[in-house]
Amino acid sequence: MDTTSTHRETQAPHKGALDGIRVIDVSRALAGPYSTMLLGDLGADIIKLEMPGTGDESRYWGPPFATYMSSNRNKRSVEVDLHTAEGQKIFLDLVATADIVVENFRPGTMKRFNLDYETVSKIKPDIIYCSISAYGQTGPMSHRPGIDLMVQAVSGLMSQTGEKDGRAMKAGGPVADIVGGFSAVVSIMASLMERRLTGRGRYIDIAMLDALMMVLNQQIVTYTATGKPYARGGNAHPLMAPYESFPGSDREFVMAVTNQKAWKAFVSIPEFAHLDEIPEYKKQIDRNINRVAMLEKIYSIFKTRTADYWLAELDKRGIASEPILTLPEVVAHPHVQQRGSLMEIEYPPNSGTKVVIPGMPWKDVAAPLVKRDPPGLGQHTREVLEELYGPDYSPQPTA
């Protein structure tokens, strides 16, 4: 099964919108590496500095080592120990050639290394320096250790996720890391535009908590406007109904009736026509108020036939509905295939082992292909340091 050919064949023949931009990446785990990978996809030269002998901790999250493989394409790995004077000099010398620094150590760590923005900006006034952390560089929680699970808990997302009477649940993917990484990229891109006008760089403080709270904008506004927090509702929408997952006789699917036109289309299905005669369901606001009784009726009817039958009936009427796909179904889906939404990388380097990973939604402005597979630890140390210091440079042996 070829999951990559369309993606590779439809890319525009250019080097990417950020061709010529250099990023010094001293991040690890997920939020930081994800953000720098996006910049690399867009054509930037990403130099990933890693601790000699150990490197990015996500290299060891597995097997399979999915976090590292999915967040580190289009980078060059250089082993540098920032605890040492030599490592700090290499970092600063690289920064002098760079446009962007991305780090996601706990707040205060880069300052202890004398590699913080205040120090770096004296050497490179136009540097864009982005720090990503769980809770930000300021505030009473800034010192606390935080990863995706903690941020999902503190943001309120977990309290809103799960069945009404069940346990609070984290999202199925690392959304705090991913939204935090995207927020960093948006801020960096805006700062690059600003630098064209001012000639100066800036410091960017990205808190994953701030970013994830944007996902809860409706819930937070509802609470601040009414004083009443949302109750967990599983897959249901708190402001409209029917809008959730439903059981066919064989599998679940989702359907959303978002306005009066969609309701009229829904009750044109013969099995549901009688619902239009019930006064409590005539208007959207009434359907929301009386959702419990209405949904019981809808569930009982949907259970009588297969999901494919109902999806066909809903589709005929233009009602938003889809099956709930498993991951094997997603990877094999014709739309995903035709869009080139997946791509193939090799990892470990030179192993011949090919892995399919999510591709580039931003492919129209990205480099045509994956330029570099995820690197081995220190794979490009000599290459980068010889570029920096010349061919006679001899790095110290790493432990």
Image (cartoon, helix red, strand yellow):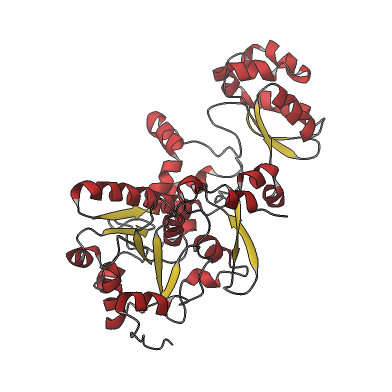
Give the residue displayed 44% in from the left and 69% down from the top.
76
Whether residue 51 can be seen here: no
Q: Position of residue 171 (x, y in %)?
A: 55, 49
Q: Position of residue 84 (x, y in %)?
A: 30, 82
Give the residue displayed 47% in from the left and 54% down from the top.
367
Where is the N terminus found, in terms of image quarters?
bottom right
The answer to which image quadrant residue 43 occupies is bottom left
Of residues 15 and 85, the one nearer the viewer is 15
Name of the residue lying farthest toward the left: 122
Establish if 160 lies above or below 360: above
Where is the C terminus found, in terms of image quarters?
bottom left
The answer to which image quadrant residue 131 occupies is bottom left
Establish if 146 lies above or below 332: below
Of residues 192 and 82, the one nearer the viewer is 192
Whether residue 49 can be seen here: yes
Q: Position of residue 170 (x, y in %)?
A: 54, 51
Relative side of 129 to 237, left or right? left
